Image: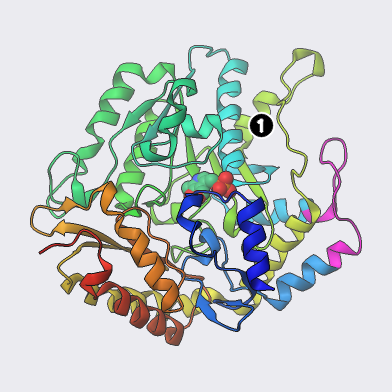
Amino acid sequence: MTKTLQEKDKQFLWHPYTQMKDYADRDMLLVDRAHGIMLFDKQGRSYFDTISSWWCILHGHNHPIIKEEIRKQLERLEQVLLAGTTHEPAIHLAEKLIGLMPSSLNRVFYSDNGSTACEVAIKMSLQYWQHTGKQNRTKLVAVERGYHGDTIGTMSLGGVPEFHQAFKGMLFDSYRVPSPYCYRCPVGKQRSSCDIDCLQPLSKLLAEEGDTIAAMIIEPLIQAAGGMVVYPAEYLRRVAKLTREHGIHLILDEVATGFGRTGKMFALEFADVEPDFVCISKGLTAGYLPLAATLASEEVYQAFYADYLENKTFYHGHTFTGNPLGAAAALGSLKVFAEEKPFTLLQNTIPHLHQSMNRFLELPWVGDLRQLGMISALELVKNKKTKEPFSFTDRVGWKIYLQGLEKGLILRPLGNVVYLWLPISATIAEIDEIIERTWSVLSDPQNISGWQC
Ligand SMILES: Cc1ncc(COP(=O)(O)O)c(C=O)c1O
């Protein structure tokens, strides 16, 4: 049965971010069920979901409270448009989300994935300036190594060329500033003695072009898809200050970081900033159903609030915007936060994870260890002294991925970066087991393709 399904998979499916030919002579893991941090196949083999099913599972799989909230909602209303009608879960959730956010944000616009949450913020900002008489504010700023999604708008603000170069010709122009990538500092400084000097280009850009810029978008504290680049809170604090000084909207993309993963409910709390927009998805429903939201300030909202004939309506929406089941799942997740108090557990698990990961630094191919909350990333290098990276052709992540499966781990390296992105419910025993198995994969030079020393 499993074999037949896997054959049909090869025949009918096209998987995301996957070179299908890699599976020409191997089967894709067929997941049958999941519980807590574990995935199970039909043969009863189990796998640690160390990347929280693409960074979204928060309280573990199969959580009774979240399932019950979805089930109850399913009995009442599964879907309705959010234009001209509304529903209870969307209203309750919006109220709760506003309560969790900085006071600058008090309007919730729903969509259904992280890319659209960002796309909405970009469009709202651009239209805001049209409505407020600053028609010249049409440019956007993003950060190299940033990632905000795969729509045309968010790709135009992406900073990971490998993902989007095929579409270069159709992307709109935007400004890019250096990534605060301390391990490979763009201005050759050491974090211990620098004054966040990598911000100079942004300072200069805003001084010269500030009044043509609508907004800047950034992932707070960690550039995730760009290589798990954890950066100092001070960088974000100064970005917020600079954008405010120049009257530019600040869009924080909390799609990956939101809802406790970093050790705080939102990563923006590390820098205590008041953005104009926050984009959330993934952990919003604890990973159970697709839902996203863009939170905006009252000032932005008011610029759209006008007589119909003034033509200030925000013409944007998706069929499943604010889907009732998704909103019920999100309310279920917030109930878990209230009842299980995961931040108490995190006080122990985060330091334990961070400390236990240090052992990887002794491996000659581990150049850097970057950690934030339940995220822990290792950058593999060919030469620790020169930081020479493994090349694209080494495909260092592929063998690690395959070996991970052998050891019962879903590891899915991003290029040369092997990382754990753990659910906030992970226990110390689970963390220890994951680290032990990851060690057995990474400490074997035979699993490090391209390692010749
Ligand atoms: C920071 C960030 N923004 C946006 C997105 C896009 O989200 P989605 O895949 O739901 O479109 C992602 C996805 O990984 C992300 O990490």
Camera-side residue of 294 and 41: 41
Q: Is residue 74 magenta?
A: yes
Question: As drawn, is 348 to the left or to the right of 39?
Answer: left
> What's the residue type where badge 1 is placed?
Tyr
Q: Position of residue 193 (x, y in %)?
A: 12, 51
Residue hosting label 1: 301
In the rendered image, residue 261 lying in the magenta stretch gets the answer no
For the C terminus, the image quarter is bottom left
Quarter of the rendering occupied by the N terminus: bottom right
Residue depicted at x 78% and y 73%: 68
Q: Position of residue 363 (x, y in %)?
A: 18, 71
Which picture quadrant has residue 364?
bottom left
Describe the element under mark 1 as helix, strand or loop.
helix
Q: Is residue 306 left or right of residue 198?
A: right
Label 1, residues with CA under 10 Å away: few <14, some 14-19, many ≥20: some
Whether residue 323 appears in this view of the structure is yes
Residue positioned 19% across, 57% down in the render? 381
Magenta stretch, residue numbers: 72-89
Residue at (67% x, 76% y) in the render: 63
Mark 1 vs ligand 1: CB below 8 Å: no
Instruction: Using the image as rendered, state which of residue 45 and residue 363 is in the foreground.
Output: 45
Residue 85 % position (x, y) = 88, 41
x then y, percent, for residue 127: 60, 22
Figure label count: 1
Return the residue found at the far bottom. 429
